[in-house]
Amino acid sequence: MSGESSSNERVEVDNNCAAGSSSNGLPNDQRDKRSVPPPIKPRISLQRKRLEREALLKQQQQEEFSKRTANKCGFLYKTDPSRKRFQKRWFIICDALISYFSEEPTRSSRVEPKGTIPFKDVMFVGECTVIDKAKHPPTRSRSFSSKTPHQTRTDCKTSISHDISQYQSYFNVGVSSQQGRIYLFAAESPKSRQEWIKILAERIAPPKCYLLSNLTRIECCGYLHVKLGISGIWTTCFVVLSGKNVTILTEFYEDVHRENKIVHVDLRKVLSPSLTTAHQISSCGTVSEIGQPISLNRPYDTTIYIQGVFKSHTESWYHLFLNAWTVPPNALLDQQLLTPSNIPVAVDKCLNFISTYGGLKTKGIYKNSGDETAVKSIFSNLRDTTKLWEWHIRPEEGYTVIDVASALKLYLSSFPECILTEKLYSEFIENNQHENRDERLRRIKCLLKRLPLINFNTLKKIICHFCYLIENADQNQMNIGNISLTMGPVLLFSSQTETDDGCRMDVIGDLITCYAWLFDVTQEEMEKERKIQRTLVCLRETRIRSSKPAGDILVGVYVYNSEWGKCINVPLTPTMSAEELVIYIKEKCNLKEPVNRLSVFEVVCDNQLERILHYSEVVLGVTLSWTTNWPADDAKSNYLIVKTNDLYDKLSPFLNQTNCRTSTIPLSLFSELKFSDINGGKTFRKVICEFIGARLNIYKDAKADKVIGQWNIEDIVWYLGSEAKRNAPSKFCITFINRDKPIIRNKESSGFIGRTICCNTEQEYYQWISGMIIAEYPNGVYPPVKTFVDLLS
C-alpha cells in the first residue's frame, strides 16, 4: 500500500506540474518550491527597472548641470523681421536652441514655440548702440510690472513709449541664416541684458574657451574674419569686446600652440576704428556678402582688419568699436587715448614739445603763464580726442614752451579727480604728518603701488621730467621749491576738501627728491633718459645750431655723395617726414631731379650699410636713435644723405605705382638662404627663411620643426648690405637689428651688429626686399601724387 500511495503521490505531483505549466500554475502555498525552477521573467524586469532608474538619474543630472551652467528663461522684447515693432516674448535657452513663446508655458501645457534660433547659426551677440527712436519698446514701469497675463498682453499692444532710458537695455543677436538677420531684443534693465549676453556668449564660445570667465562685462562677442597686418591671412577668429579691450582668439584648439594665438588690443592705443575703402584693402574672400573691413590702426603696432560674414554684421561691430573707443567728456585719466607706454597721448605730446624746444632751460617754465589765446587753443586740441593722434604742436603756429606748459597744467587740472586719485588723496595728506622721513617715504611708496596703472605711469613720467628741470635749475630757475609750489595744486587736489599749499609742496617734494627709489627706476633707465635729454640739448645748442627763433633743429644732410663734402644744415622739426626733407633739399640746392626720384638714406657702419627712409618716416627720430641705441664710435660716423633712389627702379617688376603687390610676389616668401646669427661671427649656414604675415621666420632645416628665430617686421630695422669683415658669401645681403634694443659690440657678437641673411641670386634679393617693404608700409611705398592747379589757366 505504501508503495502504491507513494507512486500515486508522484503521479499527482507530475500531473500538477503538467497542469501548472499549462494553466498558469497553483498558488504559492500549494506548490512544492523544491521541484519548481526559479522564475526568469522577474529577473529581467528588475534589470530593466534598474537601467531605467539609472537613465532617469543621468537625465536629471544633465538637466541640473544645464540649469546650473547656461540655461535661462524669462521675458524679453523682440522685434519682428522689419525691426519696426517690439513684441513681448517668453524666451528659453536650452540645449542647442533659443526658443521663444507668446507667453510663459506651464508645466502641463505643450505649446509649440513661436520660433527658434539654433546656436550653430549665431555669429555674434552684443549690445546695441544705434537704434531708431521709433522702435523703442514699452518702458520698464509699464511693461515689466507684475500684472495679470491679460493686462500684460493689453499693455504690449497699447503702451509703446519713447523713453530713452530703455536704450540702455538693447542687444543684438546676429545669425548666419536668413541673409544675416540681426535680431533686436530689449531686456528689463542693463543688468538683465548683461546676464542674457553672458549666457548666450558662453553657448556660442569655442570649447574650453576661458576668455569669458574673468570678464565682468561683455559688450560683444562672436565670430569674425581677422587679418593681422596688410600681408596677413584672413582667419576665422572668436572676438570679445569688453570695455576698451578687444581679445582675439585666433586658434580654437587647445593643443595647438602658436604665436599670436591670443591677440589683445587696447582701443585706447588705436588711432580710430574706421571702415576701410576699396583701394586700401580688399574684402575677405570667404564672407557671404562682400563689404569693406574695419581697420584698427595701431600707430606703434600691426594694423588689424576685421570683417563680419555680412555687411550688417560688420557695421554693427564697427559701431560697438567706435562707441568703446570714444572718450566721454568727463572721463578720468585712465580712459584717455594712450601711448604704448600707457601714458595719455596729450601729456606725451606736451612733454616731448617742452623737451625738444628747449623747455628744460627756459626761465620760469611752469611758473610763468602763457598767452591766453594760445593756451586755450592747445587745451581744446588736447581735449579733442577725435583728432588728437593727427594733431601736432608746431612752433611755426606761434606756440612756445611756456604756452604748452600752461596748457599741460590746465589739462591735468581739468579732470574730475587729481592724478593721485580722490580715493587716495586723504591718505597722502595724512601720511605727510609723519615726522619720521623713512616711514613717510615707505608709506608713499605703498600708496603709489595702489594707483591705477595709467596714473602711476603718467606721474612717473611727469616727476622724471621735473628731475631734469631741476638739473638745469641754474638756467630755468626752477628748483624743487618752485616746482612743488607751482605743480602741487595741479597734481594733488580734491573736489571735496581744501588742502594747505605747504602740505602739497611736501608731497610733491618727496616724489621728486626720492624719484628713483619711489618709482623703482633702475640706473640704466635713468641713464637712457638722461642720454635722450642730453641729445636734444646737444642737437639744439652745439652740433646743430638753430637758425629760427621758433626753435627748429638743424641737422647736417649730405646731397648725392658724402665725399663731395656738400652738407646742408636742414631745420628739422619733431614732425618733419622724409618726403618733406627731400622737398626742402631740392628747393635749397635747386636740384633738377624730380622729387619722386629722390629719397633719404640712413648710412651706418662706415658706409657699409644703408636703408631707405620711407617717405612718411620722421627724420628726427632716426638721428636720436644713434645716440640712444648705437655705440658712440658708430654714432659718430652715421649720417643722412639725399640721393637718387635707384633701388625702386630695380624693384619695379615687383612694385607698381599704385603701391600694390604684383603677381610676381607671392603672399609669402620661402627660400633656402644663408644666415649669420648675432653670435655667429663670420659663419654663414644654410637655413630655411619664411616671410609671411609681416613676420620673418628662420628655421634650422627644411622640416621647419626647429625655429631659430621669429621677428615681426615692425620690431626690426633692416639695412641693405653686410659688414665687410663678416665675409658674406654674396653681395645680396640684408642685415637687421632689434628696433628698441641697444646695439652692443662685444666678444659674444664677434664685434658685429645684428643678424645677416644672404640671398642666392639678384632676383631673389629684390623679391625679398619688395616683400618686406610692402609688409612694413602697407599704406604705400611711393608718396601720393600731388596735383597742382595752374591758376593762370
Image (spheres, helix red, strand yellow):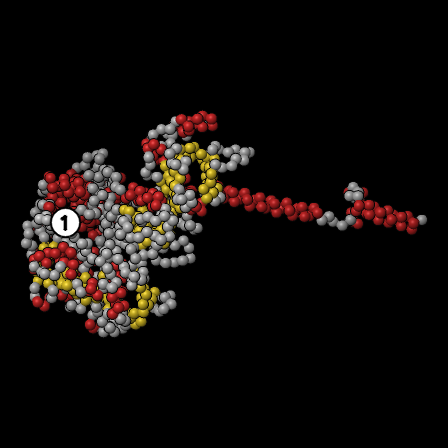
Q: Nearer the viewer, residue 137 or 726?
A: 137
Q: Residue at left 47%, top 33%? A: 102
Near mark 1 (Cα within 10 A), the count class, few <14, some 14-19 or many ≥20, is many
Q: Amino acid at mark 1?
A: Phe
Q: Quadrant of residue 133?
A: top left
Residue that badge 1 annotates: 353
Write down the quadrant of residue 740 in the picture.
bottom left
Give the residue at x 24% y 61%: 655
In the rendered image, residue 411, in percent from the top left (x then y), is placed at: 18, 41
Q: Is residue 204 left or right of residue 655?
A: right
| Residue at disc 1, secondary structure | helix
Q: Quadrant of residue 302?
A: bottom left
**Percent of width and height locating residue 228:** 31, 54
**Up-down relation of residue 554 to residue 504 (above or below):** below
In this rendering, position of residue 268 left or right of residue 169: left
Residue 698: x and y in percent read 31, 65
Q: Is residue 110 visible?
A: yes
Picture layout, residue 576 above or below residue 147: below
Q: Nearer the viewer, residue 619 or 16?
A: 619
Q: Position of residue 584 (x, y in %)?
A: 10, 56
Residue 359 falls left or right of residue 89: left
Q: Residue at x 13, y 49 (%)?
A: 789
